[in-house]
């Protein structure tokens, strides 16, 4: 397999810029997610890596070789699309074997390769069946088999599970990740589904309007979002934001919401008189009878073992993930406190996070 390096990749279609100077590295054997909403540039980025689109500027390296201006057929990659793209007049065996047959491989070698892939994907029993009568999951396995049988340097996957229903999509996500781990493939996977990205990915790039907002592991992106956009996009419910104006000094370990001091990880950069936002995940909100920050319960949503409570405060509305057994009344006044090591601070003007202690072990509040 292969390492993939992206350097200042840029793509414009006339006056519209789809991807703006993106740079990141996909490690050899990594399951790498390109995540973002429709129109954010993730599919265009994937197509430039694959050679289906040529960049306006910037470079793409695959296995140490620059391939920025090479055609897809010259890059030794395999592409899996959302809509399967199978040949309806061929059965399962011939669909999987087609890339090898087109290369002139001997029939005995083709049979061995197809048999190996079919066993891996658990589709040996359907090799002689026409693809038209297969379920969505089986058709996706056939599409994966056609990609795997070539043994390419890297796999490109453009929302391959998007056409499946929710239950089967979750099952296929688990199978796809298991398959990745067994074959050690370098995989670049496009999705708009944050849960899919968090579940499957080793690394994630979050994109918005053609810009890379953040690049990191799922835990890094969830625990330490680099921008307001990432904090709002990742998480269900997303991060809460309480807006306030204030000043920060380097090393400061608390902020003031009115007359209420809230402990935060020590900041490493100062700010003066800028509009700020305190970010807190719903699971880090606690009901505290002694909390000086007060709010009123607006609604509750029962989720079985937990509930989501919507609470209105003077600094904004927030959602708290609480035990289902905690009884709350609509209109009830409650005190609040937060789990300080996991709070975030953002500059509301730039949308960027204010740098804080990066690990819980660095917090001494």
Image (cartoon, grey):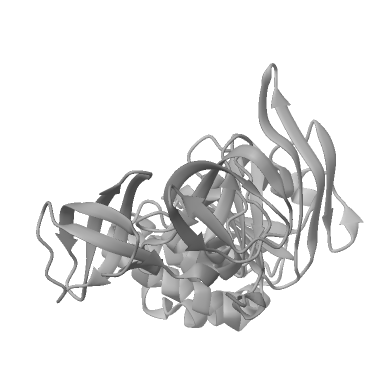
Q: Residue at x 40, y 68 (%)?
A: 284
What residue is at 56 percent from the left and 69 percent from the top?
219
Compare residues 122 and 23 and report the one nearer the observer. Answer: 23
Q: Quadrant of residue 328?
A: bottom left
Residue with the most extreme front position:
259
Is residue 347 shown above or below 282? above
Pinpoint residue 113: horizontal percent, then vertical percent.
62, 77
Q: Residue at x 43, y 47 (%)?
A: 258
Observer-nearest of 288 and 356: 288
User: x, y (%) of residue 39?
Assistant: 53, 34
* Residue 264, visible in the rendered structure: yes
In the depicted view, which residue is nearer to us: 71 or 328? 328
5 and 348: which one is in front? Answer: 348
In this rendering, position of residue 123 left or right of residue 74? left
Looking at the image, can residue 82 be seen? no
167 left or right of 356 in image: left
Q: Note whether 234 is above or below 121 in the view shown.
A: above
**Residue at horizontal 50 percent and vertical 69 percent from the top:** 340
Q: Quadrant of the N terminus?
A: bottom right
Which quarter shows the C terminus? bottom right
Residue furthest to the top in view is 15
Number of numbered discs visible in the structure rendering: 0
The answer to whether residue 125 is left or right of residue 178 is left
Residue 80 in the image: x percent, y percent? 55, 55
Q: Position of residue 178 (x, y in %)?
A: 51, 79
């Amino acid at each position: 397999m292969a390492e993939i390096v992206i350097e200042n990749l840029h793509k414009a279609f006339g006056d519209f810029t789809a991807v703006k100077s993106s740079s990141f590295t996909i490690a050899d054997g990594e399951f790498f997610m390109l995540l973002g909403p429709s129109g954010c540039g993730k599919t265009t980025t994937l197509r430039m890596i694959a050679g289906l689109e040529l960049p306006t500027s910037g470079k793409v390296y695959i296995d140490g070789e620059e391939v920025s201006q090479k055609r897809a057929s010259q890059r030794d990659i395999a592409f899996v699309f959302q809509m399967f793209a199978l040949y309806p007049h061929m059965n399962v065996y011939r669909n999987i074997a087609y890339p090898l047959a087109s290369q002139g491989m001997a029939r005995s070698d083709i049979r061995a390769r197809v048999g190996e892939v079919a066993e891996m994907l658990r589709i040996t029993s359907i090799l002689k069946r026409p693809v038209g009568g297969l379920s969505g999951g089986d058709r996706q396995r056939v599409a994966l088999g056609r990609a795997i049988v070539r043994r390419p340097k890297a796999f490109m996957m453009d929302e391959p599970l998007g056409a499946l229903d929710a239950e089967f999509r979750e099952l296929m996500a688990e199978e796809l990740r298991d398959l990745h781990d067994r074959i050690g493939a370098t995989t670049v996977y496009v999705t708009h589904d944050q849960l899919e990205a968090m579940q499957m990915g080793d690394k994630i790039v979050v994109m918005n309007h053609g810009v890379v907002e953040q690049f990191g592991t799922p835990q890094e992106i969830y625990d330490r979002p680099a921008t307001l956009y990432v904090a709002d996009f990742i998480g269900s419910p997303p991060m809460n934001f309480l807006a306030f104006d204030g000043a920060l000094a380097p090393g400061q370990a608390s902020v003031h919401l009115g007359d209420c001091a809230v402990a935060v990880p020590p900041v490493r950069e100062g700010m003066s008189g800028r509009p700020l936002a305190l970010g807190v995940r719903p699971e880090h909100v606690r009901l505290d009878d002694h909390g000086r920050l007060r709010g009123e319960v607006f609604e509750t949503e029962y989720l079985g073992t937990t509930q989501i409570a919507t609470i209105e405060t003077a600094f904004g509305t927030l959602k708290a993930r609480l035990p289902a057994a905690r009884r709350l009344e609509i209109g009830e006044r409650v005190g609040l406190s937060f789990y300080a090591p996991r709070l975030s601070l953002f500059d509301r003007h730039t949308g960027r996070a204010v740098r804080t202690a990066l690990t819980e072990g660095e917090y001494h509040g």
